[in-house]
Amino acid sequence: MGISLTASNPFRVLGAHRNFRLFWIGQTISLVGTWMQVMALGWLALELTNSAFLVGLVAVASSAPILVFSLHAGAFVDRSNKLVLLRAMQTLFLIEATLLWLLTWTGHVTIGWILGLALFGGAVAAIEIPARQSLVIDFVGREQLREAIALNSSGFNIARIVGPALAALVISHMGLAWCFAINAVSFVTVLAGLARVSLPPMDRVRRDATLHQGVREVLGYVRSHRTVRALVAVITVFSVLAVPVVSLMPVVARDLFHTGSGGYGGLLSAIGVGGMLAALVIAGPGSHWKHGRVLVLASHGSAILLVLLPFVRSWVIGWIVLFGVGFFFIANNAASNTLLQILVPDELRGRMMSIYGLIVVGLAQVVGSSLGGFVAQLYGVRWAIGGAAAALIVYLLLAFRRYPELREL
């Protein structure tokens, strides 16, 4: 029996849910600016310091507050109006981008300023991530959650394709500073979309419980549920050993493929193109696939390709490998995010998403990027990427053998 045209349309969730449509359009436009800033910031840090370690440290600084504050931020989100909170956090991101533009444009930017503003952005993200991710189910309902998460990933990867390419043009014709300026302007689009979103009143966590009690409740839930505990462990190891390749991309471009900012942007775009294709497949014809099977395939596929990447000498072949990495990264993200949100009770969703954000952003950057940058500085980027990927393959083989139920989710 074939798949109906409606079921295979990855954008059907946009037509069915006005709130999600407003959010998705504004967020996708804003993410183009964000990826311009990501590329510009990594390249600026490399220009200022000529240090692979400090390039990684910038990524660490933007994620350290997420690692420190995320759990309590999730408890705060569960007892707050998530929509109002998300609007406030997006406004603070606008302020951060504006400051980066002014400092770079006037020639006053230093690695100290970059690290300081990265810490500020990370503190904002500690609240913004669980608020944004836990709102998706309120926009579309449980039945279309996976499609919405995948479509969010498609918007993210559309931005990852367009953003670096646009940033390369802006850097070459206008200078690094204007990437930050465009990002600041882009936040107006998501704020405009969020201003038009309206949700009915919802029950929130009782306010007589402290934030610390809220954190203990969700950690107790994870510890007492074998499947959730196993899933969180797989997400953690994957995030620490695989995901940091993105933060090392400036060094990959320069040292592995001997290219400049244009080649760097192209490599980032490869990850974005692959990720966008994965998101559209999962939101459309792949929406009926088992989440667990997608998780297993995507985890192993990512690790194998990252083991191969250090042996590549051609930029074109490198682009193809990173295309595959991007495909499997987003498939992994969609499967793991959806599984966590389906398995967790509604009243714990904000806190579970704070755990997810802590892992995929906080641990991935603070532990993964700092370790990757350190290894790259001492032994070269080939060892930093290939060694971590080899360790990941060994872990995945053991984990999915010990927890076979993950395959059947």
Image (tube, rainbow, N blue to C red):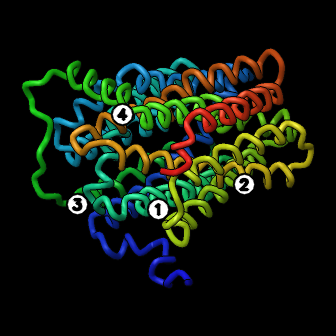
Q: Is residue 304 visible?
A: yes
Residue 84's quadrant in the figure? Answer: top left
Q: Tell me if 45 is positioned left or right of 87 in this view.
A: right
Mark 2 lies on a secondary structure that is helix
**Residue 368 place in picture, x, y as percent:** 61, 25
Amino acid residing under circle 3: Val
In the image shown, does 207 or 91 lie closer to the viewer? 207
Which mark is on residue 356? none
Amino acid residing under circle 2: Phe
Distance from disc 1 to disc 2, alpha carbons, whole Å, reads: 18 Å
**Label 2, residues with CA under 10 Å away: few <14, some 14-19, many ≥20:** many
Mark 4 lies on a secondary structure that is helix
Amino acid residing under circle 4: Ser
Distance from disc 3 to disc 4, alpha carbons, whole Å, reads: 23 Å
Mark 1 lies on a secondary structure that is helix
Which mark is on residue 354? 4
Q: Which residue is labeled 3 in the image?
A: 197
**Residue 33 place in picture, x, y as percent:** 50, 50
Q: Which residue is labeled 2 in the image?
A: 323
Q: Are marks 2 and 3 in contact (CB under 8 Å)?
A: no
Q: Which residue is labeled 1 in the image?
A: 151
Nearer-N-terminus badge (1/2): 1
Mark 3 lies on a secondary structure that is loop
Q: Is residue 29 visible?
A: no
In the image shown, does 362 or 394 lie closer to the viewer? 394
